[in-house]
Image (tube, helix red, strand yellow):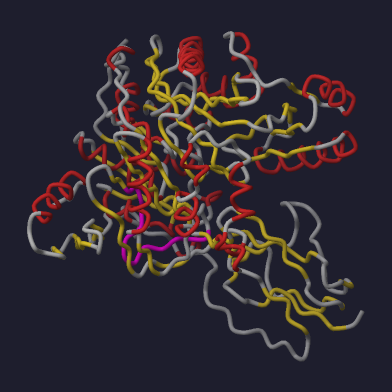
């Protein structure tokens, strides 16, 4: 049973004249909820439960590197964390030199990398002055919220 | 013209447009095969398609943007045709040519036509030849040429990527000192983003309106399906669209529609296309901006006022059939708005907000349409753009449509994501917007004065 917009409009015409405020329909293929709000107008929630008919499932080698990472032991160093989740890049474009490498001195506002999420590039700033001591994420690695990207030793 | 009947289509896209194309195919009895990345295997489109073929890891460059992977899926599934949606490979000549070679119909214009309008400079040149006015400007490859062009463009001006489109690769320059450095950066970025470092300069029209004309051609004839106004934009990305474009003199509207049809006929264009024009409010004139040789995100507002199914028209044209309508058969009634609901936090500089939907209710009723891939459990992923749903509302006139949109927005309830719904609600209540005909600078003004942001 596939519900089109026209089907929903027809259902609503019937419901409108009734005293019902809500309607729920569930089959093994879908769930449909219609509810009337204070102003008499309707809202709908449709969920398809159909199982996708997938030809071939991906091989392990192509699985994205999104395994949860253990919290890096900072060993007293200052952690530079990602401002949001996304893909971490160490350089401004493929093939360019990385923004920073181990041993570089940085200031608070030094750009140390880029995190790309939903097609937007976000610069990542060191946030503290000091020397980069460890790079904790690889180029083009996917990072979760708050992951540690680099460690630096405090000191101007 | 020989006609090929399309019975099975590969949908080379994702999200809401994949669902949208599947819906029309289902109605027409056409089998659908979806090629999806690993991240989209349990998406709504995947559940609705007849069959799903995985074409690679989540990253677009490794899946949706890989011509080989998409073609492999098309050939494996023995499809008659391929629908590229919008974005991704929808205007990619390599894909169109690969389809030709494999004997698969590319649901879009020919590779030659993609070439003619995909390169923004060529498109400008064709428009000029076809007799359309274009924004003063031109191509340049040296700083001296750039300086010379500024006499034509005036200030400020825009630096645009030749291989760009969809609002990407555009920079505003205010004075001569900034020109050379901006040009250098623009060339590097263009090379990285589009594989083509060429750029061109254009006059910046301060009080401009972005009005586009929907056209449909069959390779010989062409008609228009009215105008759309897409002036509400942030960083050249559209947020709200409406059809028809309001507050235009009949004379200007007819001139624009005629220019669009003339251009489409000149190109002997086959399929659906959109001619984008810039209306110079101060000079009460218009210029050709670019042509989009694909279905667009905002196509539903045109469908609302003309009563046609544009995906069906695409399929019809792709099958080699002649246009089913003459211009006089097209009747445009009423007014429609579309609000793009993005998974973004507008109180935090529109920071993207991926997440999982825990509950979602959308308004329902006559004149209300929602195109989305959201449902309970759906994931908005960080690998793709932030468009989560399109809310389209139709009314017998602009005032009724606007009032209905306000009520419809209030009945949207999306849990598990942060969206720009509050922004739309505030925007739709603005008196300036209610008057109609705002220009492209309006949205920035709105952001600077919006109360919800100021409170933060």
Q: Main secondary structure of the magenta part?
A: loop
A2 or B92, nearer to the observer? A2
- Magenta-colored span: B370-382
Q: Residue at x 36, y 37 (%)?
A: B336
Q: Is residue B166 visible?
A: yes
Left/right placement of residue B317 relative to residue B282 reads left
Q: Position of residue B259 (x, y in %)?
A: 51, 13
Left/right placement of residue B291 relative to residue A52 reads right
- The reply to whether the magenta stretch includes residue B71 is no
Q: Residue at x 38, y 29 (%)?
A: B107
User: From the viewer's perspective, is residue B145 above or below residue B175?
Assistant: above
User: From the viewer's perspective, is residue B360 above or below residue A81?
Assistant: above
Q: Position of residue B326 (x, y in %)?
A: 30, 12
Q: Is residue A44 visible?
A: no
Task: Give the quadrant of residue B138.
Answer: top right
Task: Give the quadrant of residue B44.
Answer: bottom left
């Amino acid at each position: 049973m596939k519900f089109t917009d026209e089907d929903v409009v027809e259902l609503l015409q019937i419901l409108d004249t009734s005293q019902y405020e809500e309607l729920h329909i569930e089959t093994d293929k879908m769930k449909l909820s219609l509810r009337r709000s204070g102003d008499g107008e309707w809202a709908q929630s449709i969920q398809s439960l159909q199982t996708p008919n997938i030809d071939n499932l991906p091989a392990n080698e192509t699985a994205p590197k999104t395994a949860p990472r253990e919290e890096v032991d900072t060993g007293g160093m200052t952690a530079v964390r990602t401002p949001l989740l996304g893909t971490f890049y160490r350089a401004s474009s493929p093939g360019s030199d990385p923004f920073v490498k181990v041993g570089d001195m940085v200031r608070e506002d030094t750009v140390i990398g880029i995190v790309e999420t939903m097609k937007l590039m976000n610069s990542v700033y060191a946030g503290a002055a000091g020397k980069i001591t460890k790079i904790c994420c690889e180029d083009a690695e996917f990072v979760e919220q708050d992951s540690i990207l680099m460690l630096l030793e405090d000191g101007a | 013209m020989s006609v090929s009947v399309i019975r099975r289509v590969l949908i080379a896209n994702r999200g809401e447009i994949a669902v949208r194309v599947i819906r029309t195919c289902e109605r027409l009895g056409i089998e659908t095969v979806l090629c999806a990345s690993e991240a989209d295997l349990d998406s709504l489109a995947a559940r609705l398609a007849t069959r799903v073929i995985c074409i690679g890891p989540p990253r677009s460059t490794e899946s949706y943007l890989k011509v080989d992977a998409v073609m492999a899926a098309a050939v494996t599934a023995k499809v008659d045709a391929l629908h590229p949606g919008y974005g991704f490979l929808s205007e990619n000549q390599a894909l169109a040519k690969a389809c030709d070679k494999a004997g698969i119909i590319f649901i879009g214009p020919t590779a030659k036509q993609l070439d003619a309008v995909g390169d923004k400079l060529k498109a400008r040149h064709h428009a000029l030849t076809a007799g359309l006015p274009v924004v003063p400007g031109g191509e340049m490859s040296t700083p001296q040429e750039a300086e010379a062009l500024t006499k034509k463009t005036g200030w400020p001006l825009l630096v645009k990527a030749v291989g760009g489109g969809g609002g990407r690769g555009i920079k505003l320059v205010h004075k001569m000192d900034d020109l050379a450095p901006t040009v250098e950066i623009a060339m590097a970025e263009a090379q990285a983003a589009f594989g083509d470092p060429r750029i061109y300069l254009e006059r910046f029209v301060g009080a401009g309106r972005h009005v586009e004309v929907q056209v449909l051609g069959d390779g010989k004839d062409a008609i228009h399906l009215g105008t759309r106004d897409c002036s509400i934009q942030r960083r050249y990305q559209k947020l709200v669209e409406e059809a028809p474009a309001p507050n235009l003199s009949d004379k200007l509207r007819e001139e624009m529609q005629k220019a669009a049809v003339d251009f489409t006929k000149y190109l002997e264009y086959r399929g659906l296309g959109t001619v984008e024009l810039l209306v110079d409010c101060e000079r009460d004139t218009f210029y050709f901006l670019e042509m989009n040789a694909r279905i667009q995100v905002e196509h539903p507002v045109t469908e609302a006022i003309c009563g046609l199914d544009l995906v069906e028209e695409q399929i019809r044209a792709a099958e080699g059939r002649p246009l089913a309508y003459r211009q006089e058969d097209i009747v445009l009634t009423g007014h429609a708005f579309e609000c793009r609901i993005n998974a973004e936090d507008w109180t935090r500089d529109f920071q993207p907000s991926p997440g999982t939907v825990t509950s979602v209710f959308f308004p329902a009723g006559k004149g209300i349409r929602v195109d989305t891939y959201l449902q309970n459990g759906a994931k908005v992923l960080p690998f793709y753009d932030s468009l989560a749903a399109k809310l389209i509302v139709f009314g017998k006139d602009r005032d009724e449509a606007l009032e209905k949109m306000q009520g419809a927005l209030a009945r949207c309830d999306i849990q598990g994501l942060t969206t720009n719904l509050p922004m739309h609600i505030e925007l739709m209540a603005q008196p300036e917007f209610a008057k109609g005909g705002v220009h492209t600078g309006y949205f920035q003004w709105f952001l600077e004065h919006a109360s919800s942001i100021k409170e933060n």
